[in-house]
Amino acid sequence: MLSGASKDHVFARLTARALEDPAQAIDATMLSAANSQLHALGWRGDKTNLTLASKFKTLAAAQAVFPSARSLDEYLDGCCIERVIQLSAKYFGRAAIKLPNGGSRISRTINTTGYYVSIEGSGLYATQLILMTPGIAMFRHGLGNVGPGKDQPIQAPFQMSKLRMTCETPSRVATMGLDISFSTSSGIGFQTALQTLAIHGFEQPIRVQNPGRGLLIDTVSCFGPDGTIQRFGAVQVITNQYCDGPSGGLTFRSLKVANYRYGVDVWMQAEASDTEADHRSIEGCNFSDVTAQNGWLTLRVKNDCRNADYRSTLWSITQSDGQGGSPGIYMERCSAVTVRGGYWITNTPPPPGDPENPIPDTNGERRYFDLRSCDTFALEDLRMDAAGDLGAHCLIHTDGGCQSGDIVRAAVIDYSPNATAGFRLQGKSPNTVRETGTKWKHWASGDPKKVVDVEHNQISQTNAKLAGGTVDETGEYSLRGVFNGITDRKGNVTVKLPMRAPGHPYFIEEKPFVLLTAASANAVPSPTLVGVSQHEFTATFGPSFAQREVHLIWLARGR
């Protein structure tokens, strides 16, 4: 450790050299020794407005110590942090620094290098970085300015932990906390890790492009300015034209978000040609204890990959929550999806006029859980609560491209009389989306709207109960009934089975298995089943019991 006198001596030497001869190269050994001591470069950490002008008479003199400086009006503390990162990476091949207790004002984006970078603070409320300039990112790793003829994204890990970042600019428009860009390569694991961070006040807290295999966001809070919903997701993950291999292994734990359109926004952008078919895929994503408040969706997954058959696979979302205008999840073209538990509260109508809130169909129905062309999914033990003047809405929607899906043991409270459906179910084929075990604790919009089976060919236990039956988790219906009537001249009776809707039977895949029991005060022959279809069955009591009153209890089972 350098003593106070030694720190002053080092900084004095640096400054003196810069003032005497700005073009003279500064001794690398001296700088590399000083990089572990921010104080040696002039860092104060007292949230001061101290700028480079307080230490240097000319910009050229300042650039001899801080080569990236563009103005003497830049805050000294921010320049010191960037320089420590640059020097550590230059002389040690990596930048692993620890920021001490204190607050630092930053006026220009801190660009890290193509080396491994690890920035650790001294605690959430010990180390604070404050952005003071509108329209920029606080940190950019990989330069981010990608495109033809521009800087390319890089392949180098980035880690940050134990600090707080705040935006105190007059305008929050286009402000960003962390802008991280990679160019992926199959098998490369970048292991970007953002842990124990508070990122508050930015229009977009975190953007990661082409994350590669390994992104960890753990114990992070992203709070936007109160009273407004920012137009981006708090965490945005994008795969774009610089992908040459798939990304995966994304882990989000204990992420708390408020006042953003999406908690997490995942976007696989379209490839330029079919030869890149799955280059921009993102797979193997795990979310636990992710909460989004005062926004639109907790998670959006947008899959624009050109290969229409591609499904982004392995999504696990457990014990996560949403509250606000449209809490829930929007996913398109995903498979092996599990959403388990969590409380999803809708209590305010979202701002009108934006088609992405969430993406509605032509009748303007807002869907809080909206799955499109998703395969093999399970929504389990969701707690859903809606109240207020919400307009036309449904809680869960699956479209005609979905298959092999289960909605199991949901608990629903909806006080809004404007629900167009509780669950609106469609599927790619009959009997492929199943709703079972739902508890309708309060429902203000009437029984027919609890589960709307759009094409009358999916599986709903709620609707089966309305028909006097049940359905198990395999999709097998058990319908019961009592027939009271008169046999015909042959001693036969024909019983119509309940229908989902006119012309749409419950039993789609096979004829049902029917059990019969006669119930009468008078002795009657045992009925015999003589014909079964998906719509009805016929039983006979024999010619000796023609045109006689009978009471028949029946049970029909099948898919």
Image (spheres, rainbow, N blue to C red):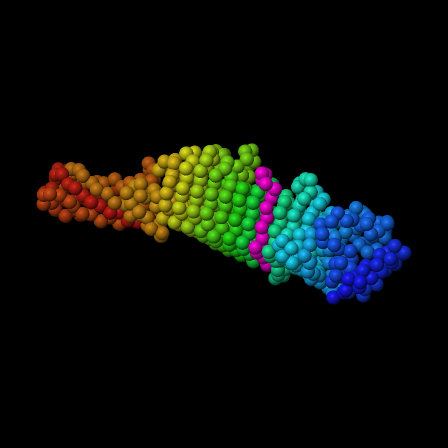
> In the image shown, does 309 or 450 lie closer to the viewer?
450
305 vs 249, nearest the viewer: 249
Q: In the rendered structure, which segment of residues is drawn in magenta?
A: 213-229
Q: Is residue 87 above or below residue 417?
A: below
Residue 291 seen in the current view: yes
- Residue lying furthest right in this view? 20
Residue 132, picture quadrant: top right
Main SS of residues in magenta: strand
User: Picture coordinates of residue 381 (x, y %)?
Assistant: 41, 50
Q: Which residue corresponds to the image point at 32% horizontal and 45% vertical from the top-left? A: 507
Q: Is residue 246 above or below residue 351?
A: below
Describe residue 15's horizontal placement relative to residue 469 as left or right: right
Q: Is residue 456 left or right of residue 548?
A: right
Residue 554 lies left or right of residue 501; in this view the side is left
User: x, y (%) of residue 9?
Assistant: 82, 62
Residue 304 point in image, percent of width and height? 57, 46
Compared with 249, 130 (above or below) is: above
